[in-house]
Amino acid sequence: MTRNQMSLYASVTGIRWDFSSSQIAGDIHVPAKQRIARFEIDPATDHFTAANALWGRIDEAFDDIDDDL
């Protein structure tokens, strides 16, 4: 994946990766709600389950934004 794609995905999702963690971890930044939601996923988790868990956390973090639009 190119650096530009990674930057775009990080910007759209609000993810700030924690590369120092032994887990798949980071924070989801939601400026409109002044919220930061932490996530950690076991790296032994299969890719499909990990991706769904991460999208679930992103959805939770941005939950009320759609109602305000």
Image (spheres, helix red, strand yellow):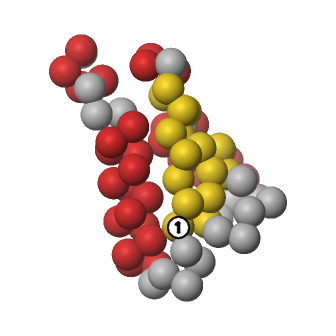
Quadrant hosting residue 40: bottom right
As drawn, 47 above or below 6: below
In percent of width and height, residue 26 lies at 63, 51
As drawn, 47 above or below 26: below
Q: Nearer the viewer, residue 40 or 29?
A: 40
**Residue in the image at 19% along x and 21% along y:** 67
**Residue in the image at 43% along x and 58% along y:** 54
Label 1, residues with CA under 10 Å away: few <14, some 14-19, many ≥20: some
Q: Is residue 61 visible?
A: yes
Amino acid type at mark 1? Ile
Left or right, 44 with respect to 69, comes to right
**Residue in the image at 35% along x and 65% along y:** 52
In percent of width and height, residue 22 lies at 72, 70
Helix, strand or loop at label 1? It is: strand
Quadrant hosting residue 29: top right
Q: Nearer the viewer, residue 67 or 7?
A: 67
- Of the 4 image quadrants, the one containing the N terminus is bottom right
Quadrant hosting residue 63: top left
Extreme-right residue of the structure: 20
The number of discs equals 1
In percent of width and height, residue 13 lies at 48, 42
Left or right, 65 with respect to 3, comes to left
Q: Is residue 10 visible?
A: no
As drawn, 19 above or below 32: below
Give the residue number, with chain letter if any, for mark 1.
41
**Residue in the image at 24% along x and 15% along y:** 69
In percent of width and height, residue 51 lies at 42, 67
